[in-house]
Image (cartoon, rainbow, N blue to C red):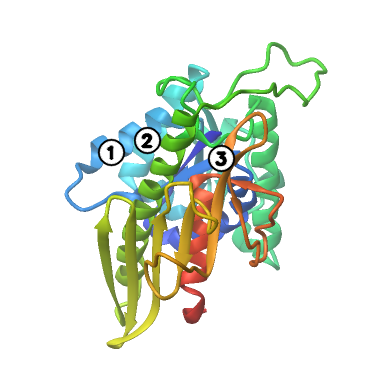
Amino acid sequence: MAKLVFSYSHVDEALRDELEKHLMPLKRRGLISTWHDRRITAGTELHGEIGQHFEDADIILLLISPDFINSDYCYDIEVKHAFKRHNKGEARVVPVILKTCDWHDLPFGKLMATPEDGYPISKFTHVEDGFYQVAQAIKSVLKELGATAQNSPTDNTRPATSPSFVKPVDSGPRSSNLGIRKEFSDRDKDLARREGIQFLSRFFENSLKEICARNPELEQDFHQKDADSFEASLYQNGQRVCHCGIWKTGGGMALGDICYSQSGVSTNSCNDAVTLEDDGTMLGFRSMMGGMSGYGRDSLLTCEGVAEYFWDSFIRPLK
């Protein structure tokens, strides 16, 4: 799994959100994880946190616009950090042209930009067409880097400091069928379940805070019942409109390994669940219901995929 980091101006946040939606198929398949500075939690030292994520990134997207170029932080700090790693061959920098601006003579002007011919996304008759081109460009980068689908939080055979993609031996023809069978121990599976519920807990807590920050009429309540379960609620003008409980069962229940219920944490029923499985090459979670568009029972989900799956169900009353 390759880590993708966004460098952007907050003025362009809505466009960044839309781009992230178009990259979701790559996230669902476990090919990428994404990060941007809106995921920094309160009390964290900003510059150090951003710098660490840039240092860990495999792909850095520069979302180019007049506001991006006008931002001293974006231009003088993030762009320099990105190019330092790009020039060393440690990461790939990809300029994404959001809006019309004079970018060709700047440092990122020497790189191949997307959409095609550097045509600004905002100029497309349907911006979805521009975002689609960007997503296809990222797919091509992933193929070149040799990225493979992985559930990184549960892969305990790879050192934490190792890169998340493998550089091909050469650029000549090769098979894409390079995965080999792996054996996963009971310890691997227990850790995967534990890390799954821990990821879901952080994801929901941060998502509740973010959606309320963007929508003043919303209030939230997050309750960590114990290490293996939590409940989440959203209130609109004081009335509860969204509620769920999510918990880890321990792997021994017919309900599944991680359960979701609109009634809160339960011991005997749920609305949906995922079960931990392996496909011979990786550990991942499989939806037992597969009831929502884009999440079939045939697909293994990463921790992030499960989180988005349950979050989609949670906020459905607000859609």
Under circle 3, the secondary element is: strand
Query: Residue reaching furthest left?
Result: 43
Name which residue lies at 45% across and 67% down. 268
* Labels 1 & 2 near each other (Cβ < 8 A): yes
Name which residue lies at 46% across and 70% down. 314
CA–CA distance between discs 2 and 3?
A: 14 Å
Which residue in the structure is indicated by mark 1?
49
Vertical placement of 192 versus 36: above or below? above
| Amino acid on which disc 1 is placed | Glu
* Labels 3 & 1 near each other (Cβ < 8 A): no
Sequence-wise, the earlier of marks 3 and 1 is 3
| Amino acid on which disc 2 is placed | His
What label does residue 32 carry, if any? Answer: 3
**On the image, which quarter does residue 235 sit in?**
bottom left
| Nearer-the-camera pick, 258 or 23 | 258
Sequence-wise, the earlier of marks 2 and 3 is 3
